[in-house]
Amino acid sequence: MTVESTAARKPRRSAGSKTGTTRTTAQSADAPAADAPATAAQRTPTKRAAAAKKPAAKTVRAVADPDLVQLLTPAGRRVKNAAYEPYVADLTSDDLRGLYRDMVLTRRFDAEATALQRQGELGLWASLLGQEAAQIGSGRATRPDDYVFPTYREHGVAWCRDIDPTNLLGMFRGVNNGGWDPNSNNFHLYTIVIGSQTLHATGYAMGVAKDGADSAVIAYFGDGASSQGDVAESFTFASVYNAPVVFFCQNNQWAISEPTERQTRVPLYQRAQGYGFPGVRVDGNDVLAVLAVTKWALERARNGEGPTLVEAYTYRMGDHTTSDDATRYRHDDERTAWAAKDPIARLRTYLKASNHADEGYFAELEAESESLGRRVREVVRAMPDPDPFAMFEHTYADGHALVDEERAQFAAYQASFTDVEGS
């Protein structure tokens, strides 16, 4: 049996278009079509020749502009999109400044956490550098009664859910297993196991539907996690049971050291059509477009129209985590090309050009940013060490002889350090 890739088919020309707007065959019928015309590079997937076997650092990957929803260009110019414009039409100057503030403070927090790890204060850190718009735009699209299931990199979404950013650091410092009550802000604990949170989200969404609530659920995952069986199972259950869940994939181009094209033959958002629900690709560095598309997807879920897959097309500007070295597999030219699409820079340009913010505002925000950095450092360094014997508690409900023996051995081991410190 021959399987034809939908990415290789010529896209249809939208009916009644005066500008040559195209729409791919994989775009769902009930998903608003993007207004931007597709180029030849958008229609042809990037191919890696035999040279891909050479050291990756010597290979320059082309950064093509995909067929996506965009409301704010990298140059900071507003563009219209009839389908999604209504979802951001009511944004005020305060709202726009708020989105910018969210991204700036989230980036400042992330930079401080990275520095703390380099200084030995954290064991590990997963940076979101470059993905601020994808997280802030989608996070601000949620309602308080919606439920969020993150991975371990959704620091910006946590910020939008009013989680104290310092609470995110306890796990990475090794002093707790989470740091917050998930039900207080409808924001689940970070999930380290790749892809499993999509199953949790789908199950929760099925429960929401059975309860008759009009809230929605959103599950975050990366392009690498999209290859996991858990994600495929989540798509199946969500589709069959018409679960009110939005699958939000942050395609940051790299699953640690594996590029996206080594994991899929079609754009990720097109996978949704095989499960019977719409998929949309949005410019993940455009906070306005992300906000609009996510609002639309969440509204579908609340209205009983089932799941949606949103692919936020963005880029991981830093390493996968602080234990990674992206220079071993990525070329500097690629990072430079994406730096020109910086989500914060483009919104700042728009705010200034449209007189939504002045230099006084940016100066005040810079001062607030530095204050946040200082608070994060102080809180992390003041975090108390956990009780080393806590790991023996709650292992068995009624206790266990072997656990008691191991506790005694550990106590003797700990005591051996006392004499050294006292000498």
Image (tube, helix red, strand yellow):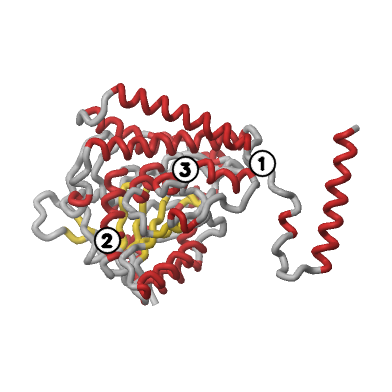
Q: Is residue 260 above or below residue 231?
A: above
Q: Could you give the CA–CA distance between mark 1 and mark 3, rounded to whole angstroms?
A: 26 Å
**Tally of marks:** 3
Q: Residue at x 25, y 28 (%)?
A: 352
Q: Is residue 204 above or below residue 310?
A: below
Q: Amino acid at mark 3?
A: Leu
Q: Quadrant of residue 261?
A: bottom left
Residue designated by label 3: 128
Residue 384 disc label? 1
Which structural element holds mark 3? loop
Does residue 262 appear anywhere in the picture? no
**In this orientation, which residue lies closer to the viewer: 413 or 48?**
413
Q: Amino acid at mark 2?
A: Glu
Which structural element holds mark 2? helix
Q: Earlier in the sequence, mark 1 or mark 3?
A: 3
* 8 relative to 88 in the view: left or right: right
Query: Percent from the top left, x then y, of residue 196?
Result: 51, 63
Query: Percent from the top left, x then y, of residue 256?
Result: 53, 49
* 206 relative to 179 in the view: left or right: left
Query: Percent from the top left, x then y, of residue 107?
Result: 44, 36
Q: Earlier in the sequence, mark 2 or mark 1?
A: 2
**In this orientation, which residue lies closer to the viewer: 218 or 72?**
218
Q: Could you give the CA–CA distance between mark 2 and mark 1, rounded to whole angstroms?
A: 43 Å
Residue designated by label 2: 299
